[in-house]
Amino acid sequence: MLIEGAIAIKAAIANKRRDVMTVYLDKNKKSHDFNYIRKQCHQNKITIEECSSAEIMTMASGKSHGGVLAEVGFRRYESANHLFLNNDIFYLDGIEDPFNLAYVLRTLCAFGFKAVILPEYDYRKFEGTLLKSSAGAFDILNIALSKDIKLTLEQFKKEAYCLYALYRGPKAKDLFKITLAKKALYLVGGEKRGIKAKVLDEVDELCFIPYGFDFKMALSAASSADVLATLVYEKRNYQ
C-alpha cells in the first residue's frame, strides 16, 4: 500500500510497526524533512526513488502528499499482554469513522498515552487515512486488537486494573470528581451502539461528563475521548 506525507512516512520508518519497502521523493523539492527521510532510508536500507513531480502526482491519491510517498506493508499489532506495562490504557469501541478514530489517537499520543485497544477489524483499507490523519500516532502508539471485549476486560481485571467507562446513566459518577486507581483502563463507546450491557457489568466505575447547562444530547465519541484524555492527564500530572 502507498502512504503519503512526510509525517506519516517518518512515523512508519521510526516506529517499525510495518515494513517500509520504497520511498518516492520529488527530486525537485528540497527540505529538512526530505533530508531527514533520506538519512533514515539509508540507515534502514530502504530503497529511495527520485521522481518527477508529475510521477508523484500520478501515484498519489490526493494533493497533500508534499512530494513524498512510500510503499509499505500493513501494520503489525501488539498483544493485549504487551500493554500490561502501561498504567493508563484506552479501549476505543465502535468509533467507526477513520478520521474520528485518527483524531482520538492523535489526542492520546499528544497527551503521552502509549496504549490503546481496538476491536478486531480489518483496518487495512483505512491505514493510509489513519496514519496520515493521526499525524503518525497510528504507528507510534502500542495498539492491540480484541476479539472479545468481555474476555479482554476480564484479563485486565486479573492484572489489577480498575475499569472506567463513559456512560450517561443514573449510576454514573461525575468524571471530574473521581479518584483514579493506579492502574486504569478507560472505555469509550461509539455514538451508534454505545457500550453493551454485558460489558458495563464488568466495569468498576461508570462516569459521565458534566455539561455546563441542560444539554440533552451526548458528545461525540471523539469529543468525549478528548475530554477524558485531558482530565486523566491533568489528574496524573498536576494533582
Image (cartoon, grey):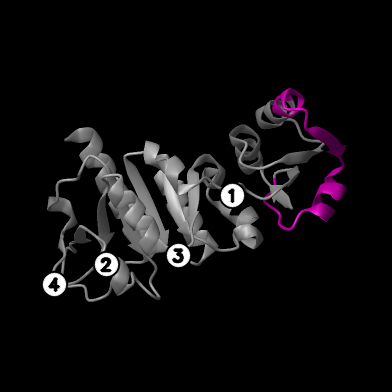
Q: Nearer the viewer, mark 4 or mark 1?
A: 4
Q: Nearer the viewer, mark 4 or mark 2?
A: 2
* Label whose residue precedes the other's in the sequence (3 or 4): 3
Instruction: Judge by depth and name the residue closer to the eye, 82 or 131.
Output: 82
Percent position of residue 144, x then y: 49, 50
- Residue behind mark 3: 95
Q: Is residue 11 left or right of residue 210?
A: right
- Residue behind mark 1: 131
Q: Nearer the viewer, mark 2 or mark 3?
A: 2
Percent position of residue 2, x then y: 74, 51
* Residue at x-position 71% and y-position 54%: 63
As shown in the figure, which amino acid type bears the numbered disc 2? Leu
* Label whose residue precedes the other's in the sequence (1 or 2): 1
Secondary structure of residue under mark 2:
helix
Tell me whether circle 3 and circle 4 mark residues in contact (CB < 8 Å): no
- Residue behind mark 2: 200
Q: Is residue 3 above or below residue 233?
A: below
- Residue behind mark 4: 170
